[in-house]
Image (cartoon, rainbow, N blue to C red):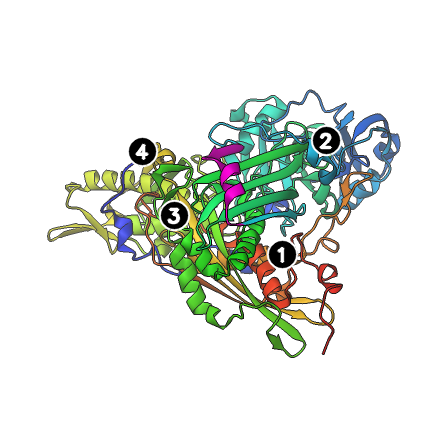
Amino acid sequence: MKFDTPATTNPIDRLRVIGQPLDRIDGPLKVTGTARYAYEQHDVAPGQAYGYVVGSAIAKGKIVSMDLAAARRAPGVLAVVTAENAGKLDKGKRNTAKLFGGPQIEHYHQAIALVVAETFEQARAAAQLVVVKYQEEKGAFDLAALKGAAPNAPSEEDSPTQSAVGDFAGAFASAPVKLDQSYTTPDQAHAMMEPHASIARWDGDKLTLWTSNQMIAWGVGDLAQTLGIAKENVRLVSPFIGGGFGGKLFLRADILLAALGARAAKRPVKVALQRPLMFNNTTHRPATIQRIRIGATPDGKITAIGHESWSGDLKDGQPELATQQTKLLYAGANRMTSLKLAVLDLPEGNAMRAPGEAPGLMALEIAMDEMAEKLKIDPVEFRIINDTQVDPEKPKVPFSQRQLAECLRQGAQRFGWDKRSATPGTLRDGKWLVGMGVASAFRGNLVMKSGARVTLGKDGIVTVFSDMTDIGPGSYTIMAQTAAEMMGLPIDKVKVELGDSSFPASAGSGGQWGANSATSGVYAACVKLREAVVQKLGFNSADAVFEDGAVKAGNRAVPLTQAAGDGEITAEDTIEFGDLDKTHSQATFGGHFVEVGVDAATGEVRLRRMLAVCAAGRILNPKSARSQVIGAMTMGAGAALMEHLVVDKRRGFFVNHDLAGYEVPVHADIPHQEVVFLDETDPMSSPMKAKGVGELGICGVGAAVANAIYNATGMRVRDYPITLDKLLDRLPALS
Ligand code: MOS
């Protein structure tokens, strides 16, 4: 089905199942521990052996020799695989560094060997016996030192890294009020609960992998290419994923090494990346240095806005797209953005929840706060003054729907913004300096082609099959809701099977496109299924109504259980979005409001209240959508206050590479969180009229926290995370 015009009437709009705050259909499996994650698929392949990964101890250089003899002799060892004995390997197109290194080493903890043994403990013990001699080369690890020489990042089709409209330099120079500031964000880790893990089983030349991966179809293609085998011979199964945040968009070492280990050991092999290996072995969100210049008239109209961002990655890697939102968020006739990319020998940088906007807004939305202060305009008001209903770079392209101003207004009202003191450092609650901060939230709404197959059985049960994944947001549930709504069934008459490459290829889980795109794929397949049912039962498709488990027209009603006869009816389709992304700018919007307390003596920052008001199209399930947003707000709080991969600039690795050293928020860090969704249906986004929320929720949170800290203390911190050492020397004495 090609979707390129607004759907005027469609069964989804009945909102009997869609739009309801239903519990997750996979909830019972999750809470009883019976939803099995990749490493727990104990019975899918008998005789599973265990692989343990050896990571490189240098960041750059080459392996001179590897002595595997002692490891091979160790108890229980079945095989030791290295790049040298693994056979010819290519690289999938989505991996920048090789998943299996050697002799050349591209980054610290790049996988260089897999030890396979009867038990995990034997594999781990034997891995310590692998002796590696390296020839280390000097690497580049310091983004700040390379900043001056970093060239423009190469542009991708549809995603230019440089943009210019009007005369930015002239307009900025002559602006009556202006700001020119720099901000930094650190490297961050996805730090998901479930480590990357895979079980591999070969049946002749057919390879099956139980894994944890967000994008099944990409994974099949990249693994087939890496191994040099036909895609048809690779099957990925990933029914449950314990978090991904972008870290499982692409293949990681576990899946390739499980496949190679199983081939070498002639047994099914399971591999999980050990937690202390993950941080340097996999990808991370790259650090940025950002310079923002804003010029405005005294009444607060932006006349010039410029945003440059520097980030680093391995050779042939990608920039962090931190200027993305600045192209679209605020009006202003004269504008420029520029992304610079330095070559670094740190582990591969790549997508992490809201890549681009998450770190970009951490800078831009502090700059907006600073500018509002210079203008003596309330920061909520300053943002509303500069709202726009068209793409500021392409004035002929309207937003399909944009309620940023409404989010900010409603948020301010609900949060009690009028009680904020405009003068920083003036509100006190005992030992706490108290302040409020605001930031806009913005995240693009991508649409991706997505397929599904649906069957109706003689029991009246509809089953949805798709390679879509559920990384936690509730894909199972909203896809079931979609099929239930389309077929006029209650949700308990729908089953959903996901995450298997033998099912139709879907949008997958990434870039917050999953909810809208994957449900639209189910919609398309159900349109076909309805047609097949109508034909079979001799109804006229124009009058047939699907409701209460029956097809009805006039005074005739036939239960769906009769449609399939003795067998089942199957329909399959794929939704495609035409040139929707060219005719309309699609995005999601929000306002984040945060209240903090800062200990006047120690500089400790405590969050006191958080509110997000979101405009993100139709909310398919308010309960799971709210969970997405509060999770994202929590991650945003982590980015503001604690998350920081610390680079060892001599040896080139992330020092704090475990969950003891890499701090993320825990329950005690998070206060009352409130999430409000504006009542919105986006007629352009899809037949579902929905968008995504999973990334919107993190966008802007960091800056809202930073701005609240400024409002509380009068101290402007422009380098994240805002740890107490950055406040301590300037704190007012405890009085
Ligand atoms: Mo997302 S960073 O595309 O999982």
Q: Which residue is mark 4?
A: 2
Left or right relative to 216: residue 108: right
Marked residue nearer the N-terminal end (1 or 2): 2
Is residue 531 visible to the viewer in this orientation of the structure? yes
Tell me the crowding category of disc 2: few under 14, some 14 to 19, or many 20 or more residues within 10 angstroms, Cα based.
Answer: some
Q: Nearer the viewer, residue 412 or 21?
A: 412
Evaluate if marks 2 and 3 touch, with contact meaning CB atoms under 8 Å apart. Answer: no
Amino acid beneath label 4: Lys
Q: CA distance from mark 2 to mark 4?
A: 47 Å
Marked residue nearer the N-terminal end (2 or 4): 4
Q: CA distance from mark 3 to mark 4?
A: 30 Å
State the SS at label 4: loop
Q: CA distance from mark 1 to mark 4?
A: 42 Å
Q: Which residue is mark 2?
A: 265
Cβ of mark 1 under 8 Å from ligand 1: the answer is no
Q: CA distance from mark 1 to mark 3?
A: 28 Å
Q: Which residue is mark 3?
A: 388
Amino acid beneath label 2: Ala
**Residue 268: where, in percent of width, then height?**
66, 35
Marked residue nearer the N-terminal end (1 or 3): 3
Q: CA distance from mark 2 to mark 3?
A: 61 Å
The residue at the point 44 percent across, 55 percent down is 299
State the SS at label 1: helix
Marked residue nearer the N-terminal end (2 or 3): 2
Which residues are drawn in magenta? 161-177
Q: Nearer the viewer, residue 545 or 167?
A: 167
Magenta run includes residue 168: yes
State the SS at label 3: loop
Left or right relative to 91: residue 4: left
State the SS at label 2: helix
Amino acid beneath label 1: Ala
Marked residue nearer the N-terminal end (1 or 4): 4
